[in-house]
Amino acid sequence: MSEEIDKARRHFLTVATVVAGAVGTVMAAVPLVSSMEPSARTKALGGPVDIDVSKIEPGSVVKAKWRQKPVWVVQRSQPTLAELPKNDSLLRDPTSDQTQQPPYCKNAWRSIKPELLVIVPICTHLGCIPLYRPEPGDPGLGTTWPGGFFCPCHGSKYDLAGRVFFNVPAPLNLPVPVHRYLNDKVLRIGEDPLGVHSSWTSPEVW
Protein backbone atom coordinates (compact mmCIF):
# COMPACT_ATOMS: atom_id res chain seq x y z
CA MET A 1 0.00 0.00 0.00
CA SER A 2 2.78 2.41 0.99
CA GLU A 3 4.58 1.67 -2.30
CA GLU A 4 1.46 2.69 -4.25
CA ILE A 5 1.17 5.88 -2.19
CA ASP A 6 4.83 6.69 -2.88
CA LYS A 7 4.33 6.17 -6.62
CA ALA A 8 1.25 8.40 -6.57
CA ARG A 9 3.14 11.05 -4.60
CA ARG A 10 6.11 10.94 -6.99
CA HIS A 11 3.76 11.24 -9.97
CA PHE A 12 2.04 14.23 -8.37
CA LEU A 13 5.36 15.93 -7.63
CA THR A 14 6.60 15.31 -11.18
CA VAL A 15 3.47 16.80 -12.73
CA ALA A 16 3.55 19.75 -10.34
CA THR A 17 7.19 20.45 -11.17
CA VAL A 18 6.53 20.37 -14.94
CA VAL A 19 3.51 22.66 -14.60
CA ALA A 20 5.40 25.09 -12.37
CA GLY A 21 8.28 25.15 -14.85
CA ALA A 22 5.95 25.84 -17.76
CA VAL A 23 4.22 28.65 -15.89
CA GLY A 24 7.59 30.13 -14.94
CA THR A 25 8.73 30.05 -18.56
CA VAL A 26 5.60 31.84 -19.73
CA MET A 27 5.88 34.46 -16.98
CA ALA A 28 9.52 35.04 -17.83
CA ALA A 29 8.66 35.43 -21.51
CA VAL A 30 6.06 38.15 -20.90
CA PRO A 31 8.58 40.80 -19.79
CA LEU A 32 10.86 39.81 -22.67
CA VAL A 33 8.12 40.27 -25.25
CA SER A 34 7.03 43.52 -23.60
CA SER A 35 10.61 44.78 -23.64
CA MET A 36 10.73 44.32 -27.41
CA GLU A 37 7.77 46.68 -27.88
CA PRO A 38 8.75 50.31 -28.58
CA SER A 39 8.18 52.56 -25.60
CA ALA A 40 5.71 55.44 -25.66
CA ARG A 41 8.67 57.83 -25.62
CA THR A 42 10.24 56.08 -28.63
CA LYS A 43 6.98 56.26 -30.54
CA ALA A 44 6.60 59.92 -29.66
CA LEU A 45 10.14 60.72 -30.78
CA GLY A 46 10.16 59.07 -34.15
CA GLY A 47 7.51 56.55 -35.11
CA PRO A 48 5.88 57.10 -38.50
CA VAL A 49 2.36 58.55 -38.50
CA ASP A 50 -0.34 57.41 -40.95
CA ILE A 51 -3.04 59.80 -42.17
CA ASP A 52 -6.20 58.96 -44.11
CA VAL A 53 -6.23 61.44 -47.01
CA SER A 54 -9.13 59.89 -48.91
CA LYS A 55 -11.76 62.30 -47.59
CA ILE A 56 -9.92 65.62 -47.66
CA GLU A 57 -11.90 68.17 -49.64
CA PRO A 58 -10.18 70.75 -51.90
CA GLY A 59 -9.16 73.73 -49.80
CA SER A 60 -9.34 71.86 -46.50
CA VAL A 61 -6.54 70.82 -44.16
CA VAL A 62 -5.95 67.77 -41.95
CA LYS A 63 -3.74 68.25 -38.89
CA ALA A 64 -1.49 65.66 -37.23
CA LYS A 65 1.63 65.52 -35.06
CA TRP A 66 4.93 63.82 -35.77
CA ARG A 67 8.00 63.97 -33.51
CA GLN A 68 6.28 66.55 -31.33
CA LYS A 69 5.84 68.84 -34.34
CA PRO A 70 2.61 69.74 -36.15
CA VAL A 71 2.11 68.45 -39.66
CA TRP A 72 -0.62 69.77 -41.96
CA VAL A 73 -1.90 68.09 -45.11
CA VAL A 74 -3.58 70.57 -47.45
CA GLN A 75 -5.74 69.52 -50.38
CA ARG A 76 -5.14 72.00 -53.21
CA SER A 77 -7.58 72.43 -56.06
CA GLN A 78 -6.53 72.45 -59.70
CA PRO A 79 -7.13 76.23 -60.00
CA THR A 80 -4.87 76.74 -56.95
CA LEU A 81 -2.11 74.67 -58.57
CA ALA A 82 -2.46 76.66 -61.78
CA GLU A 83 -1.95 79.91 -59.84
CA LEU A 84 1.22 78.87 -58.01
CA PRO A 85 3.69 79.81 -60.80
CA LYS A 86 2.32 83.37 -60.77
CA ASN A 87 3.83 83.86 -57.30
CA ASP A 88 7.41 83.09 -58.36
CA SER A 89 8.55 86.70 -58.85
CA LEU A 90 7.30 87.58 -55.36
CA LEU A 91 9.12 84.79 -53.54
CA ARG A 92 12.48 84.55 -51.80
CA ASP A 93 13.17 80.96 -52.92
CA PRO A 94 10.66 80.08 -55.66
CA THR A 95 12.53 77.00 -56.90
CA SER A 96 13.12 75.59 -53.39
CA ASP A 97 16.90 75.65 -53.60
CA GLN A 98 17.24 75.75 -49.81
CA THR A 99 17.11 72.32 -48.17
CA GLN A 100 13.69 72.70 -46.61
CA GLN A 101 12.21 69.66 -48.36
CA PRO A 102 13.29 66.15 -49.40
CA PRO A 103 14.81 65.92 -52.89
CA TYR A 104 11.69 64.25 -54.27
CA CYS A 105 9.64 67.33 -53.26
CA LYS A 106 11.90 69.87 -54.96
CA ASN A 107 9.38 70.74 -57.65
CA ALA A 108 6.80 73.40 -58.46
CA TRP A 109 4.36 72.00 -55.86
CA ARG A 110 6.85 70.92 -53.17
CA SER A 111 5.02 67.61 -52.88
CA ILE A 112 4.80 64.07 -54.21
CA LYS A 113 1.21 64.45 -55.36
CA PRO A 114 0.58 67.96 -56.74
CA GLU A 115 -2.80 68.30 -55.05
CA LEU A 116 -1.59 67.31 -51.56
CA LEU A 117 0.82 69.60 -49.73
CA VAL A 118 2.46 68.07 -46.65
CA ILE A 119 3.94 70.84 -44.53
CA VAL A 120 5.34 71.55 -41.09
CA PRO A 121 3.57 74.82 -40.19
CA ILE A 122 6.34 76.32 -38.09
CA CYS A 123 7.36 79.81 -39.19
CA THR A 124 11.04 79.90 -40.11
CA HIS A 125 11.40 83.28 -38.41
CA LEU A 126 10.86 82.55 -34.72
CA GLY A 127 8.94 79.28 -34.68
CA CYS A 128 5.36 80.56 -34.47
CA ILE A 129 2.44 78.65 -36.01
CA PRO A 130 1.08 80.49 -39.08
CA LEU A 131 -2.60 80.77 -39.91
CA TYR A 132 -3.98 78.90 -42.89
CA ARG A 133 -5.56 81.59 -45.09
CA PRO A 134 -6.22 79.93 -48.46
CA GLU A 135 -8.69 82.43 -49.95
CA PRO A 136 -7.16 84.92 -52.43
CA GLY A 137 -7.93 88.55 -51.61
CA ASP A 138 -8.62 87.85 -47.94
CA PRO A 139 -10.00 91.12 -46.50
CA GLY A 140 -7.58 90.95 -43.59
CA LEU A 141 -4.54 90.52 -45.83
CA GLY A 142 -5.35 92.75 -48.78
CA THR A 143 -6.65 92.36 -52.30
CA THR A 144 -3.27 91.15 -53.59
CA TRP A 145 -3.13 88.22 -51.15
CA PRO A 146 -2.84 85.06 -53.30
CA GLY A 147 -3.79 82.60 -50.55
CA GLY A 148 -1.41 80.72 -48.33
CA PHE A 149 -0.06 80.84 -44.78
CA PHE A 150 0.22 84.01 -42.69
CA CYS A 151 2.11 84.36 -39.41
CA PRO A 152 0.37 87.06 -37.33
CA CYS A 153 3.28 87.31 -34.87
CA HIS A 154 5.63 89.22 -37.18
CA GLY A 155 3.89 89.25 -40.54
CA SER A 156 5.67 86.49 -42.45
CA LYS A 157 3.79 85.17 -45.48
CA TYR A 158 3.99 81.94 -47.47
CA ASP A 159 2.09 80.81 -50.55
CA LEU A 160 0.14 77.57 -50.88
CA ALA A 161 3.34 75.66 -51.58
CA GLY A 162 4.79 76.95 -48.30
CA ARG A 163 7.24 79.25 -50.13
CA VAL A 164 8.18 82.45 -48.33
CA PHE A 165 7.54 85.90 -49.81
CA PHE A 166 10.06 88.74 -50.10
CA ASN A 167 10.09 91.55 -47.54
CA VAL A 168 9.01 89.44 -44.56
CA PRO A 169 11.09 88.39 -41.53
CA ALA A 170 11.08 84.65 -42.32
CA PRO A 171 14.23 83.62 -44.22
CA LEU A 172 13.20 80.17 -45.49
CA ASN A 173 10.30 78.24 -46.95
CA LEU A 174 8.19 76.15 -44.58
CA PRO A 175 9.67 72.67 -44.03
CA VAL A 176 8.29 69.63 -45.83
CA PRO A 177 8.73 66.41 -43.82
CA VAL A 178 9.77 63.13 -45.35
CA HIS A 179 6.68 61.18 -46.39
CA ARG A 180 5.31 58.58 -48.76
CA TYR A 181 1.99 57.09 -49.83
CA LEU A 182 1.22 53.53 -48.79
CA ASN A 183 -1.73 53.52 -51.19
CA ASP A 184 -4.30 55.95 -52.60
CA LYS A 185 -5.81 56.51 -49.16
CA VAL A 186 -2.97 56.43 -46.65
CA LEU A 187 -0.15 58.94 -46.30
CA ARG A 188 2.75 58.01 -44.02
CA ILE A 189 4.74 60.79 -42.36
CA GLY A 190 8.25 59.75 -41.33
CA GLU A 191 9.26 57.40 -44.16
CA ASP A 192 10.60 58.18 -47.58
CA PRO A 193 9.25 56.55 -50.77
CA LEU A 194 11.68 53.65 -50.27
CA GLY A 195 10.34 52.98 -46.77
CA VAL A 196 13.37 54.38 -44.95
CA HIS A 197 12.65 56.10 -41.63
CA SER A 198 13.57 59.74 -41.27
CA SER A 199 15.85 61.52 -38.85
CA TRP A 200 14.82 65.08 -38.12
CA THR A 201 17.78 67.44 -38.37
CA SER A 202 17.51 71.21 -38.67
CA PRO A 203 17.19 72.82 -41.15
CA GLU A 204 16.81 69.60 -43.14
CA VAL A 205 13.72 67.58 -42.28
CA TRP A 206 14.27 64.11 -43.66
Image (cartoon, rainbow, N blue to C red):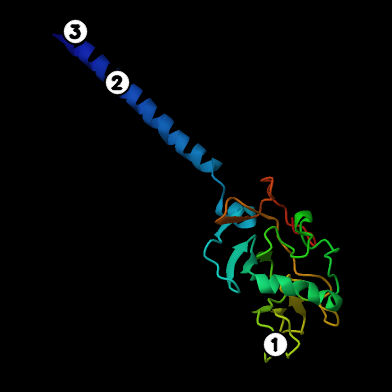
Q: What is the x, y in percent for residue 120?
A: 69, 67
Q: Is residue 122 visible?
A: no
Residue bearing mark 2:
15
Mark 1 vs mark 3: in front: 1
Q: Nearer the viewer, residue 48 or 136?
A: 136
Res 41 → quadrant: bottom right
| SS type, badge 3 | helix
**Circle count:** 3
Q: Nearer the viewer, residue 37 or 55?
A: 55
Question: Gap in Å between the C-alphas at discs 3 and 2?
Answer: 18 Å
In the picture provided, is 56 more to the left or to the right than 152?
left
Image quarter of the N terminus: top left
| SS type, badge 2 | helix
In the picture provided, is 36 more to the left or to the right than 130?
left
Label pair 1/3, CB-CB below 8 angstroms: no
Q: What is the x, y in percent for residue 196?
A: 69, 46
Q: Which of 139 and 77 is in front in this view?
A: 77
- The amino acid beneath tag 2 is Val
Residue bearing mark 3:
3
Residue drawn at 40 percent across, 31 percent down:
24
Disc 3 packing (10 Å; few <14; some 14–19; many ≥20): few
Question: Gap in Å between the C-alphas at discs 1 and 3?
Answer: 101 Å
Earlier sequence position, callout 3 versus callout 2: 3
Image quarter of the C terminus: bottom right
Give the label on residue 137, or none. 1
Question: Gap in Å between the C-alphas at discs 1 and 2?
Answer: 82 Å
Residue drawn at 84 percent across, 66 percent down:
95
Q: What is the x, y in percent for residue 104?
A: 76, 54
The answer to whether 92 is drawn above or below residue 190 in the figure is: below
- The amino acid beneath tag 1 is Gly
In the picture provided, is 127 more to the left or to the right than 58?
right
Earlier sequence position, callout 1 versus callout 2: 2
